[in-house]
């Protein structure tokens, strides 16, 4: 939740001793009181396996059927022509070029990278992350030169020669770096994350402070294979994205996006069946200051690309306003199961009243 310029009447954001910043009620309120509607989606990922049945704009779910309105070059589908037009407008010309390049690459491959399998592996530490990104720096530099210069721009003359604007001659070594990258396994969902983030940085530079204001996770990759998928996707995208995006496609920016998305993302689920189908996730900075409780005081509802928040019950002045990070099914599980899910997916031990009261005395 972006710090507002004027103090809102019903809530405020405050630092807490134990769990960062949180949202607190500034007055008492009854159930169903509207608190916030936010539409500041910075990045989103629709899982590849659901891409044909989830609208690329409003996330409307077709429940196993394919939406008939399809943007064949980018691979997105839409529930209505208005959604397709809005998506193309917001994505922009360079964005459409980027998604077309990604779809062209992915459609040539027969299956998704197995690196995306959920595995029980240690979370990479900060040194592991630095080492992994440093390990692809030399190949990335060669690719940038092959694409048109150290900064990723075409030569000024636009002659198509093998000399770059940086005065570096493109050799077979540079071209082999691109070929090597494109021969590596692909991770479509990780690539989608990177593309949406880079496009957001390109299309909305003035919104960057809202993202920077979020709590950062310095070790955002859940396992070593996920980290490898990101470094490979970085090289893939360096080789295929439109040149205007290459200056923004950097390890620092990808790490920035991952560090803010981690622990701040909201799942994008089906709406008609209590969220039984999980088909993506996104980051809405305005909504990211609500902490978790297994007995939340705030109800969140997705309406297309926006989230609506309202009081789930009577709330007293000064009370923390919390949401649940769990699905409807997960909320009904026993305390130990809930704690395990929260520990694995969000990296914290739940200390809400419902969990504390569930602890048996020794």
Image (tube, rainbow, N blue to C red):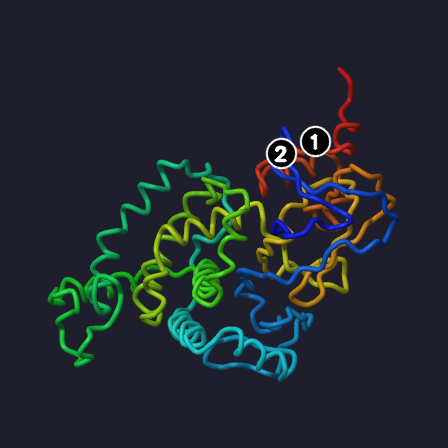
x, y percentage for residue 54? 62, 70
How packed mark 1 is, by other alpha carbons closer than 10 Å (few <14, some 14-19, many 20 or more), is: few
Label 2 sits on a secondary structure element that is loop
x, y percentage for residue 37? 71, 60
In the picture of the structure, the residue carrying the numbered disc 1 is 351
280 displayed left or right of 315: left
Q: Are marks 1 and 2 in contact (CB under 8 Å)?
A: yes
Q: Residue at x 37, y 58 (%)?
A: 233
Q: Residue at x 70, y 63 (%)?
A: 270
Residue furthest out toward the top: 362
Q: Please report whichever mark, 1 or 2, sits nearer to the chain's N-terminal start.
A: 2
x, y percentage for residue 317? 82, 39
Q: Is residue 18 above or below residue 58?
A: above
Residue 81, picture quadrant: bottom right
Is the C terminus in the top left, top right, bottom left or bottom right quadrant?
Answer: top right
Query: Which of the two discs, 1 and 2, sits closer to the camera?
Result: 2
Tell me the distance, in whole angstroms, between the alpha carbons under discs 1 and 2.
Answer: 10 Å
Residue closest to the eye, 103 or 14: 14
x, y percentage for residue 304? 68, 68
In the picture of the structure, the residue carrying the numbered disc 2 is 19
Residue closest to the eye, 167 or 2: 2
235 displayed left or right of 215: left
Q: Is residue 354 above or below residue 359?
A: below
Label 1 sits on a secondary structure element that is loop
Residue closest to the eye, 68 or 289: 289
How packed mark 2 is, by other alpha carbons closer than 10 Å (few <14, some 14-19, many 20 or more), is: few
Q: Residue at x 34, y 56 (%)?
A: 250
Residue 272, picture quadrant: bottom right
């Amino acid at each position: 939740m972006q710090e507002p310029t004027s103090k809102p009447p019903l809530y405020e954001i405050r630092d807490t001793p134990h769990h960062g910043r949180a949202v607190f009620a500034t007055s008492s309120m009854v159930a169903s009181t509207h608190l916030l509607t936010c539409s500041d989606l910075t990045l989103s990922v629709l899982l590849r396996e659901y891409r044909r049945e989830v609208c690329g704009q409003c996330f409307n779910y077709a429940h196993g059927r394919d939406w008939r309105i399809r943007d064949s070059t980018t691979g997105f589908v839409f529930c209505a022509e208005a959604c397709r037009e809005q998506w193309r407008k917001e994505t922009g010309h360079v964005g459409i070029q980027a998604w077309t390049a990604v779809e062209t690459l992915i459609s040539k491959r027969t299956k998704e990278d197995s690196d995306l399998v959920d595995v029980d592996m240690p979370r990479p530490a900060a040194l592991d992350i630095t080492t992994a990104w440093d390990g692809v720096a030399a190949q990335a530099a060669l690719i940038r030169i092959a694409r048109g210069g150290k900064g990723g721009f075409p030569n000024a003359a636009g002659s198509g020669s093998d000399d770059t604007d940086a005065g570096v001659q493109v050799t077979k070594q540079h071209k082999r770096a691109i070929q090597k990258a494109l021969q590596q396994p692909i991770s479509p969902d990780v690539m989608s994350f990177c593309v949406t983030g880079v496009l957001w940085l390109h299309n909305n530079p003035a919104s960057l402070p809202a993202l920077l204001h979020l709590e950062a996770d310095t070790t955002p990759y859940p396992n070593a294979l996920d980290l490898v998928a990101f470094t490979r996707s970085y090289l893939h995208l360096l080789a295929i994205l439109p040149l205007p995006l290459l200056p923004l496609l950097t390890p620092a920016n990808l790490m920035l996006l991952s560090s803010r998305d981690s622990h701040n993302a909201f799942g994008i689920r089906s709406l008609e069946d209590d969220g039984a189908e999980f088909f993506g996730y996104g980051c809405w900075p305005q909504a990211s200051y609500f902490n978790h409780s297994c007995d939340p005081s705030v109800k969140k509802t997705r309406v297309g690309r926006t989230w609506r928040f309202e009081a789930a019950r009577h709330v007293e002045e000064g009370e923390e306003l919390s949401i649940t990070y769990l699905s409807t099914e997960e909320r009904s599980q026993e305390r130990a199961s809930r704690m395990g899910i929260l520990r694995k997916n969000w990296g914290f031990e739940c200390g809400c009243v419902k969990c504390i009261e569930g602890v048996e005395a020794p």
